[in-house]
Image (cartoon, rainbow, N blue to C red):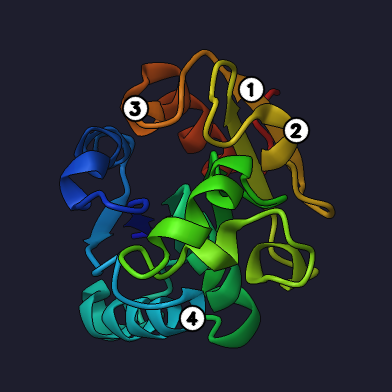
Amino acid sequence: MDCVVLLHGLGRTPRSMRRLERSLRASGYDTLNVGYPSFCARVEGLARLVAERIAAGRPGGGAADGGRLHLVGHSLGGILIRWIIVHRPPPGLARVVLLAAPNQGSRLADATAPWLSWLMRPLPDLTTDETNAAHTLPTPAGVPIGVIAGSWDWTVPVERAGLRGAADFVVARSGHMFLPDVREVHELTARFLATARFRL
């Protein structure tokens, strides 16, 4: 059975991904909803921790049963996924969906990083500075990546969610925080995991 790893965003918990998790389980996927201390380290440190938790928590411990692995991340979780697929790709990795990830950086992070990065340590990696992790991580060939942006997302506007080299891009009717709760997003995510496209 294919397994989908879900990663929440900055300041959230696995609870924020539970509706999406239930929907994917109903579509026939096993799931691993990974928590991580999103305030406590920069992107690289958090991504290394998440990669270890994926390896430890994946059903079967790997790809021995022939099942593929998919990664779905919201906001910061999407940037962690991009780091993982470049530096620590798990066995059997098949498809990736990024939900409102600040792939081009976030102007809200620009405004808050000078004041709050002591508390929210990933913030400098999420700004529009072209030298940070959100900008410099390459998009690997051979791993289809789908990007879903929110139509009224003021944290990561549509133009900031795009990723060069992504297989597909779509805009859902949602803001930022509750994008993983939206039924349209559930349907789009399941379709991309099955076909590597959002629209057939």
Mark on residue 190?
Answer: none
What is the residue that sits farthest to the front in this orientation?
A: 115
**Three-letter code for the amino acid on which mark 1 is drawn:** Val
**Three-letter code for the amino acid on which mark 2 is drawn:** Glu
Q: CA distance from mark 4 to mark 1?
A: 28 Å
Q: CA distance from mark 2 to mark 1?
A: 10 Å
Q: Earlier in the sequence, mark 4 or mark 1?
A: 4
Quick one: label 1, few (<14), some, or many (20+) residues within 10 Å? some
Q: Earlier in the sequence, mark 2 or mark 4?
A: 4
Q: Earlier in the sequence, mark 2 or mark 1?
A: 2
Residue 138: tell me if it is visible. no
Left-right relation of 179 to 32: right
Mark on residue 90?
Answer: 4
Q: Which residue is mark 1?
A: 171
State which quarter of the image contains the N terminus: bottom left
Q: Earlier in the sequence, mark 3 or mark 2?
A: 2
Give the image location of residue 65, x and y in percent: 35, 77
Give the image location of residue 66, x and y in percent: 43, 74
Q: CA distance from mark 3 to mark 2?
A: 19 Å
